Image (spheres, rainbow, N blue to C red):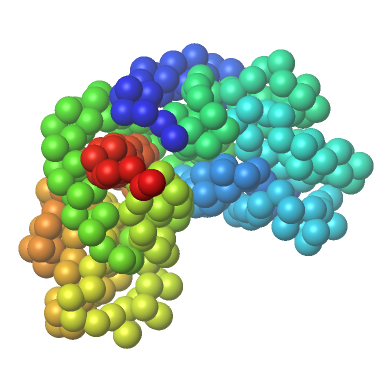
Amino acid sequence: MDTRATILEIPRLLRETLEKGAHDYEALIRHVRWGEAPIYICGCGPSLPVGVAGAYLFEWVAGLPALVRSAKVFEAYTVSTLRPRSVLLVISASGEDPDALEIVRLARSRGALPLALTRSADGPLAKACEGVFLTRDEGAEDSAAAAVCQLAALSSMTLIAARLLKHTGAGLELLEDELKRLPEQLEWSFTQLSDALRSLAQELRALDRFWLTGGGLYHPVVVRGAGRLGAFGGIHGDGIEMSQFCSGPLSYLRRGEVVMFVSGSRLRIKRVVHHAAAEIKVKGARLISLTDRNDRELVDRSQMAILVPPLSEMGGSMLALALLELLATSGARSLAREEGGRPSKQ
């Protein structure tokens, strides 16, 4: 589990990933033929949620259809669809995952072009691939820094690809500027929201179960976040995509149950979020939101709201990812204090 100190290092590692990576990313992207759709993404182990976010980014920002699978599923079902010159992006923080290496071997046997997103330029994955997008993160394979830096690298990659392919529908200049400012936004949020997250962790730990829900780029964030909260923070939330929540759990939600939305005012499906928030209020359930101050409709329908700076889905999802990691750490510290105060069993 990441400590609070290691999570607070994320802005520095994010700066290094973005500043040192941009030139190399562009050179590699120029070298790749992106027209052989779809872009295949293989998220190995804990990198699968980041891979899902990468598919959203390739489609929304760069206008390139993308398909994402875990390593085992990719090997069992997807390898047979690879064609000569198909682009495959394999994500593994350490670059030592045996499943990742097997996927690369199979891709090469079919004439596909394997690329790596990893932190190690000298690792086995990097050496097995045709090109490497390096991150500058630290820690374990599933560390918070690894996830945030991978998502930042994917954001940078898709913005560069969009410019080179002249796909300008996503407001590229605004997104590029936002990505540059993201480390300072993270620093501000860590400083200003720590107490609120600590209080929220104590409240959520008292619940048997709650729903943690997000749409668009916030979808993979809540999936990863729920796993981290449960594994390390003693906080038991079910991470679920927004439209799935609306078509299932929302219909049988009971009075007094708790739902937490992770969202933003610039979410492309925010009408779905606002409709669900209205339904939650009618049912007498309790809504907590992590969103920005411009998302007034969601804030007004929430019993508790933690407000972050207004950002696009791209920046907002990275900020939310880091804050959920900090929330898990707060829960873990609270749990450790409680267990430390219990009398030992004879």
Can you tell which quarter of the image residue 323 is in? top left
Residue found 22% across the figure and 30% down from its top: 190
Quadrant for the N terminus, please. top left
Residue found 72% across the figure and 42% down from its top: 88
Which residue of the protein is positioned furthest toward the right in this rendering? 109
Answer yes or no: is residue 139 visible.
Answer: yes
In the rendered view, would you say 80 is above or below 139? below
Residue found 24% across the figure and 25% down from its top: 187
- 65 relative to 281 in the view: left or right: right
User: Percent position (x, y) of residue 317?
Assistant: 36, 45
Residue found 58% across the figure and 18% down from its top: 24
In the rendered view, would you say 113 is above or below 5? below
Answer yes or no: is residue 171 visible.
Answer: no
Between 343 and 155, the one nearer to me in the picture: 343
User: Percent position (x, y) of residue 63?
Assistant: 53, 49
- 234 relative to 104 in the view: left or right: left
User: Percent position (x, y) of residue 149?
Assistant: 46, 30
